[in-house]
Amino acid sequence: MLRRGVLLALLLALGLATTTVPVAAQTPGVTATEIKIGNTNPYSGPASAYGTIGKAIGAYFKKINEEGGINGRKISYVTLDDGYSPPKTVEMVRRLVEQEQVAFVFQTLGTPTNSAIHKYMHQQKVPHLFVATGATKWNDPKGFPWTMGWQPNYQTEGRIYARYVLKNVPDAKIGILYQNDDYGKDYVKGLKDGLGEAAKKLVVLEQTYETTDPSIDSQIVNLKNSGANVFYNVTIPKFAVQAIKKAHDLNWKPLHLLNNVSSSLGTVLKPAGLDASRGLITALYMKEVTDPQWKNDQGFKDWHAWMQKYYPEGALDDQANAYAYSVAQTVAHVLKQCGSDLSRANIMKQAASIKDLTLPMLLPGVKINTSATDFAPIEQEQLAKFDGERWVLFGELYDASKK
């Protein structure tokens, strides 16, 4: 017994008796069998239409866990309601980091809400991965090396619309409606940058709204009365529905450019009215779940089967559910790349080491790429027009990474 005790002491001294859980044991939220991921979503409040994203992510993680997890670890997913309120997001994310002890925070939704926790995540050195907002500032690996976006950024999308207007509307008079925060201003900057010097002449009126506003009817009336024949509609779903309806009620028929984040058939176009939505133009980077051209596409069929099995209560005509599926696949790819090293530093390193990743529900030609100097994973989009039933793609795939 004495010899065995001495031998054990010697092994401990040499560090040879603790080979079961190496770096992982030092990372909050990581054990030999589990990795804990934190998330906030607006399950209530003005942006609650997006709440399905948080639920669908949980459904995808359930699928992963049923299949044995990632590298032997199951995912423990903690998602909290922040109501799209920045102070509430701060409270919920502090709870995730300090009380729940998550390994990292993933897919927190909204530009104003993520802006409120941006510095905190940097100070805590906790990965803040694939945030659900296309603000340009998430691509700042030097200033904020712990935060990374996922979807194409809003300024890129704005430049695509500007290019289309300059080419196709010779007498353009542009009216703009946007949310009065970084999200809205990013989209407007992209459009104006794309228009160049012509922006001063072409933009005839700008109107803003607050997320606490009950209605934006007066803004739409003002935009119509301005004589605008191009409507740049930068709104979240609740207000996108109102804007489309009101423009239709007023019989105002401008070229209507609708930002991508409100392009869902199920949560925006149907509630606004399919006839009222006819002719809308947006920019897409994913296969539209309501587009019959993907009916026999294997990626679409796999998504559809997953929805039926793991998220049957989710709407099959809501693009947000395909978005959630895809971003969850991206984080699963990162965790696989991490191997046995689930330190926060390595999670961030692997997130910044994605090479030509293609996902089943991204449009053909759209690839995810990141590096230590590029935190903008998706940089390709294609314009689409709503024909009263579905979004119809047209034109070439625009690639912002090849400027």
Image: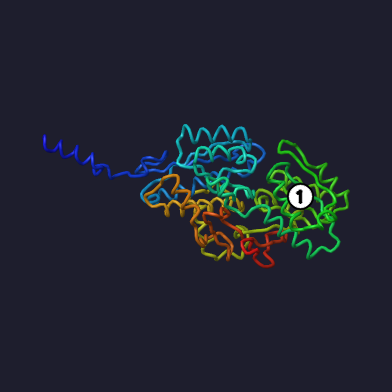
Query: Can you give x and y, in whole percent of width and height, for residue 357 in the image?
Result: 51, 60
What residue appears at the point 40 percent right and 41 percent down from the top-left corner?
A: 30
Figure quadrant of residue 369 = bottom right
Quadrant assignment, res 288: bottom right
Name the one closer to the observer, 309 or 370. Answer: 370
Q: Helix or strand or loop: what does disc 1 sit on? A: helix
Q: Residues within 10 Å of mark 1 (few under 14, many from 20)?
A: many
Q: In this view, does 103 lie above or below 244?
A: above
* Quadrant of the rendering where the C terminus is positioned: bottom right
* Quadrant housing the N terminus: top left
Of 24 and 316, the residue lying toward us: 24
Q: Where is residue 54 in the image (x, y as percent from the top left)?
A: 55, 44
**Residue flagged by tag 1: what amino acid is it?**
Ile
Report the side of 107 relative to 154 (left or right).
left
Where does the image place residue 84, in percent across and percent down from the top left?
Answer: 63, 38
| Left or right: where 38 falls relative to 71 | right
Report whether 77 appears left or right of 142.
left
From the image, tell me which residue sits under label 1: 244
Q: How many marks?
A: 1
Task: Find residue 314 and report its horizontal and vertical position in percent.
Answer: 56, 48
Residue at x-position 73% and y-position 41%:
180
